Structures are given as structure tokens and as C-alpha cells.
Amino acid sequence: MPPLTRSDDAGPACDTDGAELIACPSCDALYRVQVPPKGGRATCARCGTVLIRPIAGAGMRIIALTLSITILVTAAVFFPFLEIHASGIGNKTSLLNVATSFRSGILVLVSVATVSMIVLIPLMRTLLLLYVLVPVVFDRPPARHARHAFRLAQEIKPWAMTEIFAIGCAVALVKISDLAQLGFGPAFWMFAVLVVIVVINDSYMCTWSVWESLEESEG
């Protein structure tokens, strides 16, 4: 699908004869909207960022994947994450133990940040997405304040670092594998699956399509 039409010389939005505009979230280039066919995509000519990518049936898939993420994140908090054995001494820990390992002094902030970024914020974002998408996908009026909820979900996305935590743990485990015997608990495999699901979920998500659906429903 070719890039969208640039509107750098179009002047203010009010002078574009009613043409709908879209801005690239990466480089702020402004374009007139040209909706690609299902399965196609419209990209930014300047940086290549995908701006519009409508996919048939994407709403139900996103809801299913978002529910899976919610369940996996919640369950992974309580199941054992890792077992370490060295010199006849073993220790088993869960994600909750790791996140709350610092309980005094300024290091408490580390625990708060860890819990927030790998558990609370991801859960908050998935719940916001479900709140916004479920009524729209099932052809019901948008939930109250759905626009604000979706905007908040997009704003906190960079701070939802569950998959980053999982990848970081994998790298750290490779480095210490020669020093101790490692055993992976259920929570570790949940995070491994979670990384894959997050990537797939993001590939289905078209922000422009969600905004359009909310506008059409409210209209």
C-alpha cells in the first residue's frame, strides 16, 4: 500500500475542505487520510511508521488476546518464577517476591516501580482496552468516557514493561547459568508466552480504526 498523501502545504486543518487528517506518531508528518483495503496498510513516507492497518475481524482477536494477557499477568504474580540451586542450597522465588524484595529506605521506590511497570500498569492498560473495545466490537454504544479511556491506554503503553522484564530475565539467566543450576517455574513460561501474545496483539491493533469506530458509534 503506498504512503498517505502529504498535507504539509495544506495549511490549518480547517482549510483542507473537510479532509480528515492523520499525524504520524513518530515524526509528526501530517497526511490526508486514505483508507487502505482490508489487509493493506498506509505508512508514513518519512519514517515508515504504519499509520492505518485495518484487519478483518481484528476486534474479536484483540479482545481474546487482551483477556489472555490479563490472565497470564495476574497468574504469573503468584506462581513460582525461578528456582536456583548451588552448592546444595536451593531457593525458589515468585515475581511478587522479586518485586517486593526491597522493603526499606529509598530502595522501596525500586519495588514500587517494578510492581507498577510489570504488573499494575499492564493490567490497567488491558482493562482499559477491554472497557473500550468490547461495546464497540459487539455493536453497542461506546462505554462512558471511552475516548478518555483509550487515550489513557495509549499514553501508558510505553510504561507497560512486562515483556521487557521477561526478555531481561532471559538475558540475565543466560549469564548466570554456569554458576548455578536453574529451574524455570510456571510463571517463567507464562511470561514467555506473554511476550509472543503482546507482539501478536500489537500487530492487530490499529489505533486509527479504534478512533473511527468510537466516532461512528457516538455519531
Image (cartoon, helix red, strand yellow):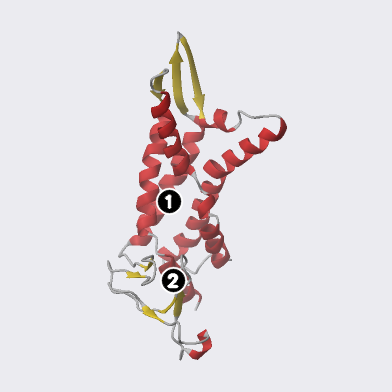
Give the labeled residue for mark 2. Answer: 213
- Please tell me whether mark 1 sits on a helix, a strand or a loop: helix
Q: Give the crowd class for mark 1: few <14, some 14-19, many >=20 residues within 10 Å.
A: many
Q: Position of residue 146 (x, y in %)?
A: 54, 65
Give the labeled residue for mark 1. Answer: 66
User: What amino acid type is highlighted by mark number 2?
Assistant: Ser
Q: Identify the residue shown where x is 44% and y is 43%.
A: 163
Q: Give the crowd class for mark 2: few <14, some 14-19, many >=20 residues within 10 Å.
A: some
- Please tell me whether mark 2 sits on a helix, a strand or a loop: helix
Q: Identify the residue shown where x is 42% and y is 24%.
A: 176
Q: Position of residue 172 (x, y in %)?
A: 44, 31
User: Which residue is at the far right?
Assistant: 105
Tell which circle, 1 or 2, labels the residue nearer the N-terminal end: 1
Q: Identify the residue shown where x is 31% and y is 64%.
A: 55
Q: Position of residue 178 (x, y in %)?
A: 38, 20
Question: Is 108 or 130 nearer to us in this picture?
Answer: 108
Do we see residue 13 in this rendering?
A: yes
Q: Is residue 19 above or below residue 58?
A: below
Label 1 to label 2, Cα distance in Å?
A: 18 Å
Tag 1 near tag 2, CB within 8 Å: no
Do we see residue 185 in this rendering?
A: no
Question: Is 189 or 71 nearer to us in this picture?
Answer: 189
User: What amino acid type is highlighted by mark number 1?
Assistant: Thr
Residue 165 marker:
none
Q: Identify the residue shown where x is 46% and y is 65%.
A: 26
Q: Is residue 30 above or below residue 174?
A: below
Q: Is residue 123 above or below residue 105?
A: below
Q: Is residue 22 above or below residue 55?
A: below
User: Which residue is at the far top?
Assistant: 88
Q: Position of residue 161 (x, y in %)?
A: 50, 45
Total marks in image? 2
Q: Looking at the figure, which quarter contains the N terminus?
A: bottom left
